[in-house]
Amino acid sequence: MTIVIDCRMLDASGIGVYLNGCLPFFLSSENNFLLLGNPGRLISFGNRSNVKIIDCDIKPFSSKELFFFPKSISDEINKATVYFSPYFNIPGGIKIPLFTTIHDIIFPDMPEITSRPGLEARMYFYRRCFRYSKKIFTVSEFSKSRIEHYSKSKKPVIVTYSAIQPQLLDYMNRQKKIRKNKTIVFIGNIKKHKGLNCLFEAFLLARKEGFSHKLIVIGGTDNFRTKDKTALNRMRSFNPEEVYFTGSVSNEQLIEYLSSSELLVQPSLYEGFCLPPLEALVLGTNVLISDIPVLKEIYEGFPVNFFQAGNAIDLKEKMMGILSQNLPPPLLSNEQLHKYTFEKTTNKILRELE
């Protein structure tokens, strides 16, 4: 079987993590692969006998991808067996079976985060995905239920969870003891559904009660149309000694910040999976997360703490309570460490492609 994998979003945040995690297991299977994307970024995967790289810099979801996708590329793709995308964009001219991935379906569920034209454009791409995909992959039972709600079709929706990056486990195996700083950390792009305003309100309330921990905000401000400008302006008004915004960071820097913090706070109002709490737990950092359904699903049985989503007072009380107890690092069982792995995810995708 020859599988085309769309790798153009290899450097994207959650999608890139998912794709980078799956690729080594894909390429180790007894299949041939055409990797669609930037040859420079794919160079580490291109030295295998079963891999060919197709140079393609056409932007996903662009009019060029839809209507003017190069025939030379689509002709080469159509010689393969199947086409797999880690997202829900579909180039024009593809005639082989299509398998796509919808990580979440936030825009119709939270229409307030975008404009009416923006919502209509995104719904067009969702509907196109529903129509042309042979099967759709997603990263949680919650997202599956929402996809099925909007698709109103009988197309199979298969849950293939996201997972821990192997380098985090390698890092922990190398470390004997990590020194914790008086910091709490938030990880995520500065977008409205991430709940950052609630965290700022809770942080200010805690400061009035003598809270002395520093808040580190790790995340990019990409995607101008949906970023939370209120939270961004508020963040910039803080003293950097109280709230420090790192912007986007490397994996090595992320591990350093996350492993040395005493607490990760994830105040999300909506997610498809939400990987940072799992990363924090693996790195020995305690976790406080909102009680939205998907986080209840993904972190059931894990040593995490929940607060009422959107409630700054409850978040402040839980945050201060956890830090005042000087809790030891959380410990994951062997079963929990191996519940979400990219090997499992990839093997499930491959079975469905066959």
Image (cartoon, helix red, strand yellow):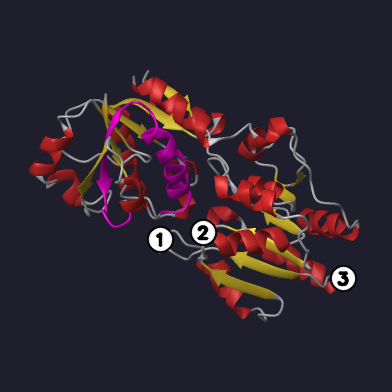
Residue 336 located left or right of residue 91: right
Q: Does 216 sit above or below residue 150?
A: below
The location of residue 21, given as percent across then percent down, is 47, 42
Crowding at mark 2 (Cα within 10 Å: few <14, some 14-19, many 20+):
many
Q: Does 65 sit above or below residue 30?
A: below
The residue located at (72%, 33%) in the rendering is 334
Q: Disc 1, disc 2: CB below 8 Å?
A: yes
Callout 1 amino acid: Asn
Q: How many marks?
A: 3
Disc 1 and disc 2: Cα gap in Å? 9 Å
| The quarter of the displayed image where residue 278 is located | top right
Decide which of 156, 3 is in the foreground and name it.
Answer: 3
Find out whether residue 90 is within the magenta segment: no
The location of residue 219, given as percent across then percent down, is 54, 63
Bounds of the magenta span? 12-41
* Label 1 SS: loop
The location of residue 156, given as percent across then percent down, is 40, 20
Callout 3 amino acid: Glu
The single residue placed furthest to the right in the displayed view is: 325
Residue under label 3 = 209
| The quarter of the displayed image where residue 239 is located | bottom right
Find out whether residue 40 is within the magenta segment: yes
* Label 3 SS: loop
Q: Earlier in the sequence, mark 3 or mark 1?
A: 3
* Label 2 SS: loop
Q: Which disc, if any, is residue 191?
A: 2
Q: Does 138 sit above or below residue 221?
A: above
Residue under label 1 = 223
The location of residue 336, given as percent across then percent down, is 69, 34
Disc 3 and disc 2: Cα gap in Å? 28 Å
Q: Earlier in the sequence, mark 1 or mark 2?
A: 2
